[in-house]
Amino acid sequence: MAIVADLIAKRLYDQGCRHAFGIPGGEILTLMDALSRAGIAFHQCKHENAGGFMAEGTYHATGAPGIMVATIGPGAANLVNCVANALQDRVPLIVLTGCVPPAEAATYTHQVIDHQAILGPVTKASFQVPVGAAAEIIDKAVAIATEGQAGPVHLDIPIDVAGTDAAGATIPNHSVPEPSAPASGQALDNARQLLMNAVCPVMIAGVDALNQGAAEDVCAFAKRYKIPLITTYKGKGIMPEDNPLSLGAAGLSPKADDLLLPFIQSADLVILAGYDPIEMRAGWRNPWGEGSKVIEFAATPNRHYMHQADFSFVCDTAAGLRSLGENIPGKETWPDGKIEGVKAALSEAFPCDETWGPAAVIDEARKAFPKNGVATVDTGAHRILLSQIWQCYAPRTLTQSTAFCTMGVALPMAIGHRIADPDTPVIAFTGDAGLEMVMGELATLRDMKIPVIIVVFVDKSLALIEMKQRAMGFDNLGVDFGNTDFPALAEAMGGKGVLADSRELLAAAIEVGLRHPGFTLIACPIGEHAYDGRF
């Protein structure tokens, strides 16, 4: 007999989902069983927040929505951070919570809170699943999560509904919208004329280009028209960053902004390809010059007002670029070596030749780690520096929280990615404070026998906030903490622990970690104030 939970599980399986994360509770046991029977493995995490980032990791690995399952009350409440991150970082996350039946909740209050009131404000949509329309609701959830600008959708499933007979119910034959191109007309003709006339064009691409599957088209368009490409941090690798036209990523580094913003201001044409400014600093409000013309291909109408464009097409990014360039030949751009000049200046602004320190850690790890591997990085000072130095050669090979900028993401995202794609090596970069937030998930690595490499920048400080305190003339307050013996912790949790305080030791540890069947944690002490003047 098929039950409502089976309908939900089958629809998610048909969408390509193969993994779900959570902590079991009585209100979700029926749902967990249905997911498992449908072919979706349930993985126990140590905290629901970390489980949400594991689910995000599976999305980056496979393209299928992540699935997070939480029980009533405290389980659902623990989800708020990872769900809010999915909303701002444009991650399709299906959030399944169990609840008591509404009639029972009228007189039974133990652990009963309004899940929808908590999660509704940080999701694209929140539904309580009714018996008679479960098939329609799960289909709506998948559509809303994946179409337009991706994001999380919450389903609250009463215990009695999950196990109700669903005989005769079928998933609707939902019509998936075809990728749309800009409509023919004067606006498109004028935009094409701008491309033909441009001498100094520049392109900025972001997360929506990735979510629309347009990375190859963006790269090909830039190469065809010899347009230098800047990406957001999440867009790193849309064009291999060793390409002469790639100017790397921008978002949080004042040093990078000092070089990239004047370059953009000197452009006569700016093309925004799936660019969402939610990742950017305030200085990226209308960052182009007064004489620049701007063509935008966006997943949704502009409601952020971070910038405006002369022509804003709400469409599929790849289809938009193809329409823009139709029958227009490529030509030489940016005379006098200006592209090469700004690329060289960026390299000089972020040197990697120090004997030891955070840049040396990043540089040596990049040399030792396979080009086709995936890196995750936690929020903090190290993330800003790494996002500028770490070269990506394909999209989605560096994942991070770039819009919400929450901590504690690198380790669980690495776990999720490696579970979903066991053949691709994964390295997680984290600060010591970020790792201490999610140390329990080292047990998840142990139990699942997942070979992830973890590199910890050890400075015993919330370095980014400490830097801001000093800049404001304040004394250190609440930013310093003790020294955790991370190698000993790794060994105690069933992994391999290494202390690396030189390039040679770090390279050797990564080499060993790539062959080790379990997880390898490499602690890299970098000293106080190691990030001063770095970004």
Image (cartoon, grey):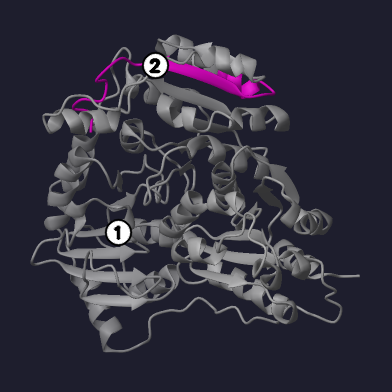
Q: Is residue 374 left or right of residue 341?
A: right
Name the residue: 30% across, 61% down.
225
Residue 262: x %, y % from top left: 12, 50
Amino acid type indicated by mark 2: Gly
Q: Is residue 229 left or right of residue 495?
A: left
Magenta segment: does it hold 529? Answer: yes
Residue 11: x %, y % from top left: 72, 68
Q: Pick the quarter of the image with the C terminus.
A: top left
Q: Is residue 252 above or below residue 155?
A: above
Name the residue: 14% across, 64% down.
268
Magenta span covers which residues?
A: 510-535
Can you name the residue that lies furthest to the left here?
290
Residue toward you, 293 or 326: 293
Name the residue: 22% across, 24% down.
476
Q: Is residue 293 left or right of residue 238?
A: left
Q: Disc 1 designates what residue?
A: 277
Q: Pick the quarter of the image with the N terminus.
A: bottom right
Disc 1 crowd rating (10 Å Cα; few below 14, some 14-19, many 20+) is many
Q: Is residue 393 above or below residue 480?
A: below
Residue 528: x %, y % from top left: 27, 17
Q: Is residue 312 above or below residue 260?
A: below
In three-dimensional space, the C-alpha distance between marks 1 and 2, rounded to whole angstroms, equals: 37 Å
Q: Disc 2 designates what residue?
A: 482
Look at the numbered disc 1 and give the secondary structure of its residue: helix
